[in-house]
Image: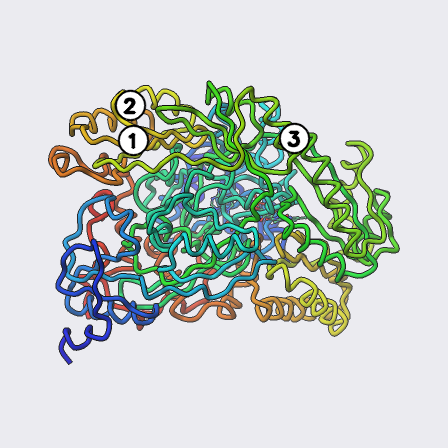
């Protein structure tokens, strides 16, 4: 059978995805593996597409095949007493979190996910604002089932909250930006949501971070700084009394940045306040104190501005990555900056999963 | 030059051990297997490690990294002629970055000493294996060690931001970094838990955790294990994640009580120790909730520690459990499997039945909150044939855990102990992927050959050959 015939059963349309010769949506991870196998045979470039909310990272891929995960949409298993859910990659973060909330649980994914999928959030390594307290997203990926670049279905990790059985492939998948294969499903470690939550507006985020005991987040934006807390009523009252701020109930997260260009500075957390001083007055930002992530949105930034920020970040042992880039910044500004010294090793690791190089080829730093 | 001469040239005679007696000491770890060590090197610096790796390779010998040798899976036990690199002398704690709450440390730093060192800054290193007063941070990284406080804090991998590693080519690479999410693939995550098979870890950037302003310990006693397990689940499903939640069965409680006199109720079938941490009012409120949950689930005794000294004594009791076993028998095999929390009772019953079947004293003291079981079999190795029974029972425990949806190891790793059981959870394609990943780091198996993955894992029948490879 010819390629068109072989891919016909998977043919689909995806709004917002780039034009490609084939746009397909496998209904299972085995089907995803079949498609990747065909891609290997024909030397096709495959771009994996989740919700399309975080496709802006890294070097562009001009795909022959867009592989959408939207048919991988099942919640396979959820054991509330074990705090573990097994979910397919194409499930929307918002759908999953709504379900989990029915029993007071959360996978601690993005607070305002838009159309993001679980698989896409993992592939892009989106940890959300609550990272200060709950750690990065990779710490919640217990098991992964993946269609590798060469068309095999592999499973690694396990459906238990703690595991020292073999190499940690689930964490390796986190942040791999679709370069190793297609994540089919994952087991996620869940957290119980504390009964009470509060957002406390404060003057000085650095001081607040030092004062509060392990807050959920300390965020600073152009307009205000706030400490996010949760716990028992007693714990909240006690913490708030020590903070000298204004309390609001619940967690009031900042609006997502909807600018043409969104850049993310990642620096050692002690440099967070200094990084904020690098942001021009006319730009919007949100800085996660204690984490070292500063998200910056601008409709006017030039490539010189972006390069200046990157220089500063790299000089402080950090990086500046692109989440979204306005067209006029595409020349004169590299999406990644200085590649890691381990690019050679990264290349060999990619080859271990995707030897032919069909999965988002060249997307990672160093063109890996 | 001979191997020994080259190494002595590099390190001097004092740091190259080849006397049979010294080699014998390094032929075993905390587990039950023994191997023969060719030569032991004790480097002081990363560049010495690089040179040792190069020399070993020139002589065609593999390299076995070793920390304190407390590992229980035989990870640091050589399976054939090899050069062993012991990292205990690389034990410097470099500047603690109090603001970012991180520190670069040598792999030979003792786990507990790191927390003691950072105490003055109000910080500690969260993963706290029961062996923490002797095991090294490098060994912890290699095994992705867990501990009492991993329920709330996660295992080692959540507390290691970067590692410096000497690779098979004798290159020094840094995986991970100080800033969140360094760009590119997260190779740091692969290095953690790789059991010395990918390289020698020569420096570690650890994440430190704030000491809690307040804590409270509860002792909850039950007349059957089922109620204790139900309490564990109920606490967590009420939205409380205690700092630690540990269970001891009757045999363990009796042994510990004789040994430490911690005031444990020896008539109970199971004792839970729960530690609540946080701010003082918050801790008091949560401790009361835990107490009422326990009562509602049939606890026969609920005590809240009346003083920090009492809490410390209870925890000392918990941590001495393995030492206390010596009263029962001279040797023990400490097992490690993990199951979904809701399957604890089912698997515990199976574990006791296996103990009866093989006529072995089975004690259970474990990380209940994580579903991480540590059945301990006490025996006397002087008894003929007893080790065969121990090994057979150990394998059955693994099978029972896997059947309940669990995993081979929660924190001790695979090493050689469980290497040949990997096929119980992973299929050939899964193992092949793991083997390829290892190959990307160490194609010639210079480091710890024969560990973790069973022979034949790398199967060229799967997938496609790399670009440019011969068909
Ligand atoms: C009584 C007792 C209680 C224990 N309790 C726990 C517990 O609660 N939780 C837990 O997780 N473990 C526990 N353990 C197991 C053991 O202490 C841990 O596995 C520990 O992490 C091993 O550290 P080590 O320095 O002794 O390493 P070793 O035993 O020397 O080595 C372990 C493995 O790490 C590799 N390795 C060591 N150093 C390096 C390095 N620098 N670079 C690369 N590879 C290296 C070795 O090759 C080997 O594969 C316990 C052990 C005992 C004896």
Q: Nearer the viewer, residue A88 or B309?
A: A88
Q: Residues within 10 Å of mark 2 (few under 14, many from 20)?
A: some
Query: Could you tell which of marks 1 and 2 lies nearer the N-terminus?
Result: 2
Mark 1 vs 3: CB contact within 8 A? no
Image quadrant occupied by the C terminus of chain B = bottom left
Disc 1 on helix, strand or loop?
strand
Distance of mark 3 from mark 2, alpha carbons?
A: 35 Å
- Badge 3 marks a residue whose secondary structure is loop
Q: Are the residues at dot 1 and dot 2 in contact (C-beta closer than 8 Å)?
A: yes
| Closest to the observer, A320 or B364 | A320
Label 2 CB, ligand 1: below 8 Å? no
Tell which of A51 and B317 is nearer to you: A51
Q: In x, y percent, where is residue A172?
A: 38, 51
Where disc 2 sits, the SS reads loop
Q: Chain of mark 2?
A: A
The image shows residue B35, relative to residue B68, as above or below, that is below
Q: Residue furthest right?
A: B267
Q: Is residue A138 above or below residue A256?
A: below
Residue wearing tag 2: A279
Asked whether the viewer can see residue A254, the reply is yes
Q: How far separated are the C-alphas under marks 1 and 3?
A: 34 Å
Disc 1 within 8 angstroms of ligand 1 (CB): no
Query: Is ligand 1 less than 8 Å from the beta carbon at label 3?
Result: no
- State the mark number for residue B279: 3
Chain bearing tag 1 is A
Q: Subunit of mark 3?
A: B
Q: Which disc is residue B347 wearing?
A: none
């Amino acid at each position: 059978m010819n390629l068109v015939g072989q891919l016909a059963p998977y043919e689909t349309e995806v709004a917002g995805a780039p034009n490609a010769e084939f746009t397909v949506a496998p209904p299972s991870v085995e089907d995803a593996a079949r498609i990747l196998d065909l891609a290997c045979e024909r030397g096709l470039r495959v771009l994996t597409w989740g919700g399309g909310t975080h496709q802006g990272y890294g070097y562009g891929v001009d795909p022959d095949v867009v592989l959408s995960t939207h048919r991988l949409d099942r919640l396979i298993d959820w054991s509330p007493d074990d705090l573990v859910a097994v979910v397919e990659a194409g499930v929307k973060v918002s759908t999953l979190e709504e379900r989990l909330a029915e029993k007071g649980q959360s996978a601690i994914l993005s607070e305002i996910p838009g159309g993001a999928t679980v698989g896409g959030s993992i592939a892009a390594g989106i940890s959300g604002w609550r990272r200060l307290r709950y750690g990065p997203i990779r710490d919640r990926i217990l098991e992964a089932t993946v269609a590798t670049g060469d068309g095999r279905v592999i499973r690694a990790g396990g459906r238990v909250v703690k595991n020292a059985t073999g190499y940690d492939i689930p964490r390796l998948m986190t942040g791999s930006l679709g370069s190793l294969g297609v994540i089919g499903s994952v087991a996620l470690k869940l957290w119980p949501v504390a009964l009470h939550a509060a957002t406390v507006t404060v003057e000085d985020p650095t001081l607040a971070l030092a004062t509060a005991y392990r807050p959920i987040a300390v965020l600073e934006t152009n307009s205000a700084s706030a400490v996010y807390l949760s716990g028992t009523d007693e714990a909240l009252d006690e913490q708030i009394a020590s903070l000298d701020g204004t309390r609001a109930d619940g967690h009031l997260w900042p609006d997502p940045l909807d600018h043409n260009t969104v850049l993310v500075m990642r620096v050692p957390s002690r440099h967070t306040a200094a990084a904020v001083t690098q942001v021009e007055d006319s730009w919007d930002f949100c800085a996660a104190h204690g984490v070292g992530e500063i998200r910056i949105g601008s409709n006017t930034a030039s490539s010189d501005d972006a390069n200046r920020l990157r220089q500063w970040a790299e000089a402080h042992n950090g990086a500046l990555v692109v989440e979204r880039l306005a067209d006029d910044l595409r020349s004169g500004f590299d999406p990644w900056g200085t590649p890691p010294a381990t690019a050679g090793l990264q290349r060999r690791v990619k080859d271990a999963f995707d030897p032919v190089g069909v999965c988002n080829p060249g997307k990672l730093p160093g063109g890996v | 030059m001979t191997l020994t001469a080259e190494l002595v040239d590099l390190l001097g005679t004092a740091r190259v051990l080849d006397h049979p007696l010294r080699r014998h000491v390094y032929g075993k770890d905390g587990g039950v297997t023994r191997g023969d060590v060719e030569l032991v090197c004790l480097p002081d610096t990363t560049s010495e490690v690089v040179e040792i790796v190069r020399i070993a390779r020139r002589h065609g010998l593999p390299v076995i990294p070793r920390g304190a040798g407390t590992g229980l899976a035989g990870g640091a036990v050589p399976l054939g002629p090899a050069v062993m690199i012991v990292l205990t002398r690389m034990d410097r704690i470099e500047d603690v970055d109090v603001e970012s709450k991180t520190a670069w440390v040598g792999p030979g730093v003792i786990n507990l000493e790191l927390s003691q060192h950072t105490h003055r800054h109000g910080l500690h290193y969260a993963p706290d294996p029961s062996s923490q007063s002797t095991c090294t941070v490098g060994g912890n990284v290699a095994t992705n060690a867990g501990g009492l406080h991993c329920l709330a804090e996660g295992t080692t991998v959540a507390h290691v931001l970067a590692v410096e590693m000497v690779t098979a080519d004798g290159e020094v690479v840094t995986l991970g970094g100080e800033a969140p999410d360094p760009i590119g693939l997260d190779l740091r995550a692969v290095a953690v838990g790789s059991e010395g098979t990918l390289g020698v870890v020569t420096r570690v950037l650890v994440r430190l955790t704030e000491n809690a302003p307040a804590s409270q310990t509860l002792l909850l006693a039950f007349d059957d294990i089922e109620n204790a397990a139900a309490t564990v689940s109920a606490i967590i499903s009420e939205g409380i994640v205690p700092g630690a939640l540990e269970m001891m069965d009757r045999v363990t409680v009796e042994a510990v009580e004789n040994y430490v006199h911690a005031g444990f109720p020896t008539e109970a079938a199971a004792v839970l120790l729960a530690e609540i941490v946080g701010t003082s009012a918050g801790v008091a409120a949560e401790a009361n909730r835990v107490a009422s949950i326990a009562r509602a689930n049939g606890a026969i005794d609920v005590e809240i520690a009346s003083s920090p000294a009492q809490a410390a004594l209870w925890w000392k009791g918990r941590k001495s459990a393995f030492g206390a076993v010596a009263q029962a028998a001279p040797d023990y095999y400490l097992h490690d499997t993990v199951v979904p929390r809701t399957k604890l009772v089912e698997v515990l019953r199976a574990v006791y039945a296996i103990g009866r079947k093989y006529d072995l004293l089975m004690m259970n003291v474990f990380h209940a909150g994580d579903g991480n079981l540590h059945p301990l079999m006490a025996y006397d190795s002087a008894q003929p044939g007893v080790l065969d029974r121990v090994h057979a029972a150990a394998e059955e425990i693994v099978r029972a855990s896997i059947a309940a949806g669990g995993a081979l190891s929660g924190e001790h790793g695979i090493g050689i102990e469980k290497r040949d059981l990997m096929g119980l959870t992973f299929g050939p394609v899964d193992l092949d992927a793991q083997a390829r990943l290892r190959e990307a780091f160490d194609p010639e198996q210079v480091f710890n050959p024969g560990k973790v993955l069973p022979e034949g894992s790398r199967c060229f029948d799967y997938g496609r050959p790399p670009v440019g490879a011969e068909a």
